[in-house]
Amino acid sequence: MPFVDLDGIRTRYETVGQGPALLMFSPGGFDSGLENWTTFGRYRDLGFVDAFAPYYTCVVFDRREAARSGGRVERLTWEKYVDQALGLLDHLGIDSAHAMGGCVGSSTAAALAVAAPARVRSLVLFSPAGGPRYRMAQHRRFVQHLAFASEQGLGAVVDLARSTTAGFSKDPRVGPWAAVLRTDEDFAAAYAAVDPARYERIVTGTVRGLFDRDTVPGVEPEDLMTLDVPALIVPGQDASHAPSAARYLEECLPVHEFWDVPVAEQTAKTAPARILDFLRSHGS
């Protein structure tokens, strides 16, 4: 798969299919690799990429700090995730694209539409991550990571990350930079040498900024309310994808369709077809 340097951060991506561009923000939180569209949780069975590829050019990629993409020890923000997406569109020569987010990818997709509405033809927000339990779980992971880093040192974080394949969601001790620690020797050496006090400030600022509300994180409601990009909202139904998160988007987005069906009825037969209908109704 190809790589491109975007603002000094290596990004792994792939284009699959033919037709208008569909930029796909992967599910999986801090482990949002492009393979998650075909291997992760319920997405393994839904078959989105295969279903869309005959009609759209699916642009899938590893979010920065995930899978085989690179990263930087800095306060992570939704704006930085948007910058990566815009850089990838620029690299591919894509002026505008449909955007689809799965899980927490919905937050970046929505943030992209707010930051650059002229470049987003439509939004598909599938099982958006959010809700009070989701926020609490994210904060708990960061607390556990900082406790381990403080007690054992950043060198121990590097050693632990390299001794396991577990991501941040499975083992919070490895932290949000675990994937890069495994794939980049220079990054790992620089990470281990970061001043502990500075690192604590970076991590604390990251979690406080990324997960600051008990609903869908990433975009202010006033910005959503002034957005005229059409959106399809598909609700989830568990502790990390609360139905209230999807309803929040329904309330905030002026131009939307809400596919009000239970998760059990969002199948490989129904979900891709519903999304394709939406995409076609909003032009090529």
Image: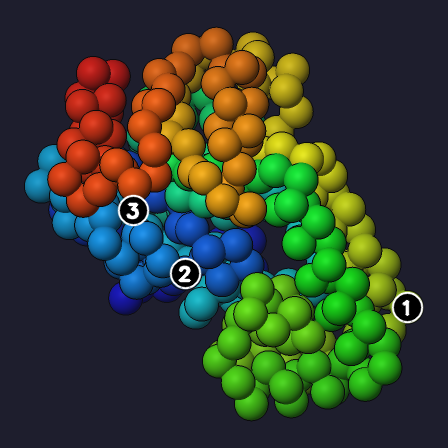
Spot occupied by residue 21 in the image (x, y as percentages of width and height): 25, 36
Residues 135 and 27: in front is 135
Q: Tell me the quadrant of the picture where the N terminus can be found.
A: bottom left
Tell me which label, 1 or 3, sits earlier in the chain: 3
- Binning the other alpha carbons within 10 Å of mark 1 as few (below 14), some (14 to 19) or many (20 upward) gives few
Spot occupied by residue 167 in the image (x, y as percentages of width and height): 53, 71
Spot occupied by residue 186 in the image (x, y as percentages of width and height): 61, 81
Looking at the image, the residue that sits furthest to the left is: 54
Picture residue at 71% right of the left edge, 35% below the top: 213
Residue wearing tag 1: 197
Instruction: For the residues labelled 1 and 3, say whether their Cβ atoms are less than 8 Å apart.
Output: no
Check disc 2 and report its element: helix, strand or loop: loop
- Binning the other alpha carbons within 10 Å of mark 2 as few (below 14), some (14 to 19) or many (20 upward) gives many
Mark 2–mark 1 distance (CA, rounded to whole Å):
30 Å
Spot occupied by residue 47 in the image (x, y as percentages of width and height): 20, 50
Using the image, tell me which numbered label, if any, was put on residue 177: none
Residue wearing tag 3: 59
Q: Is residue 27 left or right of residue 265?
A: right
Residues 262 and 120: in front is 262
Using the image, tell me which numbered label, if any, was put on residue 33: 2
Picture residue at 84% right of the left edge, 64% below the top: 200
Name the quadrant containing residue 262.
top left
